[in-house]
Image (cartoon, helix red, strand yellow):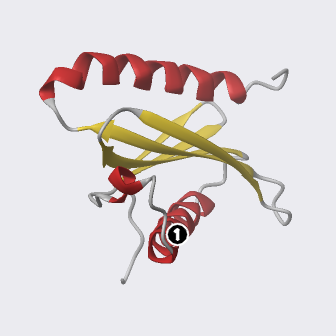
Amino acid sequence: MRYLEPDLVIYKGDCQYVIDAKYKSHMFNQERITEDLKEIFRYDLHQILAYSSFGTALNKRAILVYPASHFMSRELHISNPLTRAITYVCLVGIPLDVASIGHTKFKLDELIERLQRSQSPDQ
């Protein structure tokens, strides 16, 4: 890989949002987590942390999006002791069927609202 390029980077106020979509089916296999699956997640996590490290914002949000059977999200908070930046990482599973579009949009709106609230100093 000659360069790192996430799917989307957004700056809003003092916050950086890095979004990277993955086209791997392992969110369908959550009940059977193997060592290989852990390694794939670890690689994806390191990749999005590398993407977010290039921005100068102290508040960072990184979102990894995978196909899934139903909407799901898991959140991690990772701090960098060198820069004191905190990166909030969300693993998001999105169903690919048309019937789920309305519900998925609603859940994504909720997630974005929660991420925006988590960047305010009084939270």
Residue at image coords 36%, 59%: 26
Q: Going by the image, does 100 lie left or right of 40?
A: left
Residue at image coords 85%, 20%: 122
Residue at image coords 55%, 20%: 113
Q: Going by the image, does 100 lie left or right of 108?
A: left
Q: Position of residue 50 (x, y in %)?
A: 56, 67
Q: Position of residue 45 (x, y in %)?
A: 54, 63
Q: Going by the image, does 12 lie left or right of 29?
A: right
Residue nearest the observer in this picture, 85 or 66? 66
Check the image and report above or below for 70 versus 2.
above
**Residue position marked by numbered label 1 in the rendering:** 38
Res. 98 visible in picture? yes
Check the image and report above or below for 19 versus 99.
below
Q: How many marks?
A: 1
- Local packing at callout 1 (Cα closer than 10 Å; few below 14, some 14-19, many 20+) is few
**Residue 115 picture quarter:** top right
**Residue 5 picture quarter:** bottom left
Check the image and report above or below for 99 versus 68.
above
Q: Three-letter amino acid code at disc 1?
A: Lys
Q: Going by the image, does 31 lie left or right of 69?
A: right
Question: Outermost residue toward the bottom?
Answer: 2
Question: Outermost residue toward the left?
Answer: 98
Q: Position of residue 70 (x, y in %)?
A: 33, 34
Q: Position of residue 64 (x, y in %)?
A: 45, 50
Residue nearest the observer in this picture, 57 or 31? 31
Task: Tell me the quadrant of the picture where the C terminus can be found.
Answer: top right
SS label for mark 1: helix
**Residue 78 picture quarter:** bottom right
Residue at image coords 42%, 70%: 4
Task: Tell me the quadrant of the picture where the N terminus can be found.
Answer: bottom left
Res. 7 visible in picture? no
